[in-house]
Image (cartoon, rainbow, N blue to C red):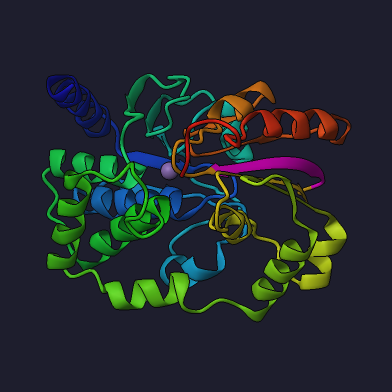
């Protein structure tokens, strides 16, 4: 594994050194890992005199705005680029729509989703890692770029976003050592934690309250919730990461499922903890993700089928527990 990573890091470096300008694409509806990793890479590329633009056509998640505003681009691009770098993007259906204007360019694919389809000319893909941020730190080291305050903050945001502040079992001692390095290099962790977790908009709390009211237990350890466009409009908030996290964190819950309406379509978001795994269920609906955090597009006609499948994930009556 270690020599394999070393070899692919070398290929990644060779790819980057052979071009002068890059369009960096975090996945659609980018989260902290995708955006933090992308921004860290952009800053590192600029330090070695490359041109790099991070494209993000969706609204930035609320807590990330103070760190990302003005550093990502969604105005029409007039420039041309020599290569694409897809970040935290498991497959081409998760890539942003601007890709269609640049699909002739070579792709470097940097990701930690086990379901990644290796769609790039160079694929730096390690499914076991906590975050793409952890992988991006290796890329930046490979390029010989020193971590400064801004790069460290972007990587720190990536790392804590995908590990829920170092709480998930995807965390290794290497992840914690990276966290320590980032603090040493100047990341203002107090400011980051405050904006990401300590400044929740009241509208979000209204949405959480609505979701709590609408949640039903399919068994003692499986919770299900459905949110409609009206629910989001009533709360005035449209992000779902905190909703599904809240459901997962309920006492005795092993599996949390959220069906919701977004961008004109229905989606399914799944989270689990302990022994419970949800990647297989997401896959069966045409999606993917991680063992304990996955999602898929969803067809409302399948709602009863989904509930049946969710009940099958229950451990009630089995000799397993959280
Ligand atoms: Mn990620």
Residue numbers of the magenta segment: 264-271
Q: Nearer the viewer, residue 314 or 90?
A: 314
At x 46%, y 44%, the residue is: 322
Residue 303 found in image quarter: top right
Q: In the visual, does 37 lie left or right of 304?
A: left
Q: In the visual, does 272 lie left or right of 6?
A: right
Say whether residue 72 is magenta: no
- The prevailing secondary structure element of the residues shown in magenta is strand
| Quadrant of the rendering where the N terminus is positioned | top left
Q: In the visual, does 3 lie left or right of 119?
A: left
The quarter of the image that holds ligand 1 is top left
Residue 244 visible in image: yes
Q: Position of residue 273 (x, y in %)?
A: 48, 44
Q: Position of residue 88 (x, y in %)?
A: 43, 39
Q: Position of residue 126 (x, y in %)?
A: 32, 29
Task: Look at the picture and state if 270 lies above or below 76.
Answer: above
At x 38%, y 40%, the residue is: 22
């Amino acid at each position: 594994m270690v020599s394999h990573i070393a070899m692919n890091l070398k290929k990644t470096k060779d790819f980057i050194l052979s071009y002068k300008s890059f369009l960096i694409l975090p996945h659609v509806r980018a989260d902290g890992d995708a955006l933090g990793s992308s921004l860290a890479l952009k800053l590192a590329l600029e330090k070695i005199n490359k041109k790099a633009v991070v494209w993000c056509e969706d609204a930035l998640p609320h807590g990330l705005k103070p760190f990302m505003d003005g550093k990502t681009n969604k105005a029409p691009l007039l420039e041309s680029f020599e290569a694409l770098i897809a970040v935290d993007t498991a497959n081409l259906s998760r890539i942003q729509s601007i890709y269609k204007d640049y699909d002739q360019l070579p792709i470097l694919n940097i990701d930690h989703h086990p379901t990644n389809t290796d769609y790039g000319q160079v694929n730096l893909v390690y499914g076991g890692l906590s975050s793409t941020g952890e992988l991006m730190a290796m890329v930046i080291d490979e390029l010989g770029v020193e971590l400064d305050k801004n790069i460290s903050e972007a990587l720190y945001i990536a790392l804590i976003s995908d590990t829920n502040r170092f709480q998930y079992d995807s965390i290794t001692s290497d992840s914690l050592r990276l966290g320590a390095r980032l603090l040493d290099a100047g990341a203002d962790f107090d400011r980051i934690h405050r904006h990401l977790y300590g400044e929740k908009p009241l509208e979000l709390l209204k949405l959480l309250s609505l979701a709590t009211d609408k949640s039903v237990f399919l068994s003692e350890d499986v919770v299900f919730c459905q949110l409609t466009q009206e629910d989001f409009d009533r709360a005035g908030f449209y992000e779902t990461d905190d909703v599904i996290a809240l459901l997962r964190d309920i006492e005795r819950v092993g599996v949390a499922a959220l069906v919701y309406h977004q961008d004109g379509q229905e989606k399914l978001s799944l989270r689990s903890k302990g022994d419970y795994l949800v990647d297989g269920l997401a896959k069966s609906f045409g999606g993917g993700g991680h063992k304990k955090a996955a999602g898929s597009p969803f067809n409302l006609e399948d709602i009863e089928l989904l509930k049946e499948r969710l009940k099958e994930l229950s451990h009630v009556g089995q000799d397993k527990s959280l």
